[in-house]
Each structure stands twice: as C-alpha cells, then as structure tokens.
Amino acid sequence: MLLTNLELAFRAASVALLLVLAASLLSDFRNVLAGRLGAAFALGSAAHAASYSVGFSSLAAGWHAPLIALSTGNIVVFWLFTRALFDDEFRLRWWHGVIWAAVTAFSFVGCLWIAPSGNVRFPVTAVNLMVLGFIALAVAQMIKSWPADLVERRRNVRVFIVCAAALYGGVNAVLQILVAGSAGDVANTINAGVLVSIVAAIAYTVMRVDGADLFPASVATPPILAQPAAIDESADQKLIEALMRLMADERIYRQENITIGALAGRLKIPEYRLRRLINQRLGYRNFNVFLNNHRIEEAKAALADPTQAEVPVITIAMDAGFQSLGPFNRAFKAVTGVTPTEYRRLNTSTA
C-alpha cells in the first residue's frame, strides 16, 4: 500500500509540474514554434506520467489506451521539439503530422486489438523500437546543431533538456522490450520517482535561464556591414575587423562545412572567444545565421547585377556557399521577405 501511494504521489506531482510547464510555455511563447512544441511535449509527457508502467500486460482499460497512445506519439513531438529548439529556421510540414498520427494510431490499435489477441510482444517491441529511433534522430539533431548556437546561457540548458528526456525515454524503451510481464510495484515506484525528479530538474533549469534566450521570438538578422555599437576593448575591435576581412576579402563563408572552430583557428583565438564575440558584439544568436547573412548579401548583389541576369539562381546560390536551392530560398526570403527570383525581378526592373 505504501509503495502504491508513493507511486501515485510521484505521478500526480509529475503531471502537475508538466501541466504548469505547458501552461507557462503557451502563455509566454505561443507565437514561437519551439514554445508551442515544448508545451505539446509537456502535455504528452503528462499523459506518459499518468499511464506508464514498467513491463506490460495483454489488456489495457478503455480509458487507458488513449493515454498510452498519446504517450507513444509524444516521441514524435519530442523529435520535432528538438528540431525547433536547435534550428531557428525549422518549420512544421504536413507530413510531420502524418508521422505523429501514424505512431499514435498504431499504439492505440496495439492496445485495444493487437495485444488482447495474444500478440502483445509484437506491438510493444515495435512501438519501443520506434521510440528508440526517434530518440536517435533527436540526439543526432542536437549533436549537429549545438555547435552553431552562440548564446552561452542557453547552450547547456538545451543539451540538458534533450539529454535528460532522451536518456529517460531510451532506458524505458529498452526495459519495455526486455521485460516480460509486469515488473511490479517497486520498479514502477522507482520509475515514477525518477520521472518526477527529471521533470523538476528540467522545470528548475528552464526557470534559471531567460525564456527569450531559450525560445527566441525571431531569428536575429542584423546587417552584416553595420559596425557594432559601444565596443570598449581595442582587442575586440581588432578581432572584429580581422573577422570582417575574412568575410569580405577571402569570402571564407563560401567554404563547404565551415565551422566556428575552423574560423577561430584562422583568427588564432579560442573558439569560446569567437563565439562570444559574434554573439555579444555583433548580435548574432546562431553561427549559421551569421554565415548565411554574408552569403545572402553576396547573392543579393549578384541578383541585382544586370550583367548576371542570365545566371541561374542555383548557380548564384552555390557560388555564395549554399549547398542546395531549398535552404537558400528559405534563408533568402527570411532575410529579404521575397524569393530570390522576385528580388531579381524587382531590382532589374528598376535598374
């Protein structure tokens, strides 16, 4: 009885914290994709806290099945949340919703029809393999995008949120695959206690960082030719001048897969100092945005040049350092408000 009451208390605390976190995100960041997905992830996690148990049985109550299905589909929301959290230019597509609906529907069907027919191992294994797959995608996105984040206060917070959620979800997915039958009250109480601890740690960590840093309302796109204001240190001024020479004269942004570490090496300074310089002195929050703004400035000049009117847009994009047309079009429109083709037409018609 004691273990049962303790488990219920842990579950109730997790659900309460997650609902408060979701409400806070929706209240403060409902216009930001990462904030909305964070709230959706918190709500799905609340469904998980209310319904999850280590191990499995062949029967699920009718009211229990929707919660389990939402909990399962939440792994897709976690992946999308990670994408939005680490990529300011990420946008939802219709097929993201199809993936979420397919995973959720499969879990629901597994609870109500497949498992009761005696094939409980199949849906459980299939669902948790999908969970591990989406966790791997989320972690890969974090590893890929984290180095480009220039805001020091949020870099570690984002990694902690993703790693804590991924570790908890991954361990539980493996347990569900390996454990046959129910694991008992002790295991479920421990699991509920671990979950409420992780949720409390994430909530506390989120409160310690400026929400505007964690969920920026817009991508910062300051003019790349403007001089930063109030530079007090002459050393910083010299470094900025050297950085701008690399951009303007050598056009180092054209190099494929240029990293902030490689750029710091060219300037002969530590990476953390260059990261801080670009963020705090030039006003950029993301290294890729910093590079893309230089690339777009070059592309704008080429598109407005009457002598290059016959040069294909894809050629101009590749020459400026973009690897494909899609990302170039999205980045160009985010900065200028029009597509590259429209920009060329508007500028050549007024020339």
Image (spheres, grey):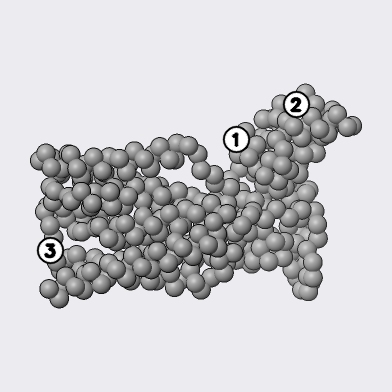
Name the image quarter holding the N terminus.
bottom left
Residue that badge 2 annotates: 311
Name the image quarter holding the C terminus.
top right
Residue under the point 48% across and 37% down: 94
Disc 2 is placed on an element classified as loop
**Mark 3 / mark 1, whichever is N-terminal:** 3
Residue under the point 63% across and 40% down: 330
The residue carrying pointer 3 sits among few (fewer than 14), some (14 to 19) or many (20 or more) residues within 10 Å by Cα, namely: few
Say which of 266 and 139 sits in front: 139
Going by the picture, which residue comes out furthest to the front?
Answer: 63
Q: Quadrant of residue 267?
A: bottom right
Q: Is residue 2 above or below residue 217?
A: below
Say which of 180 and 48 sits in front: 48
- The amino acid type found where label 1 is placed reads Gly
Distance between the Cα atoms at labels 2 and 3?
69 Å
The answer to whether residue 196 is seen in the rendering is no
**Mark 2 / mark 3, whichever is N-terminal:** 3
- Label disc, if present, on residue 96 of the rendered structure: none
Going by the picture, which residue comes out furthest to the bottom?
Answer: 2
Residue under the point 77% across and 39% down: 300
Q: Horizontally, is 28 left or right of 120 in the view?
A: right
Residue under the point 26% across and 51% down: 68
Q: Are marks 1 and 2 in contact (CB under 8 Å)?
A: no
- The amino acid type found where label 2 is placed reads Val
Q: Is residue 26 above or below residue 333?
A: below
Residue that badge 3 annotates: 184
- The amino acid type found where label 3 is placed reads Gly
Going by the picture, which residue comes out furthest to the right?
Answer: 351
Foreground label between 1 and 2: 1
Q: Horizontally, is 308 left or right of 105 in the view?
A: right
Distance between the Cα atoms at labels 1 and 2?
17 Å
- Label disc, if present, on residue 326 of the rendered structure: 1
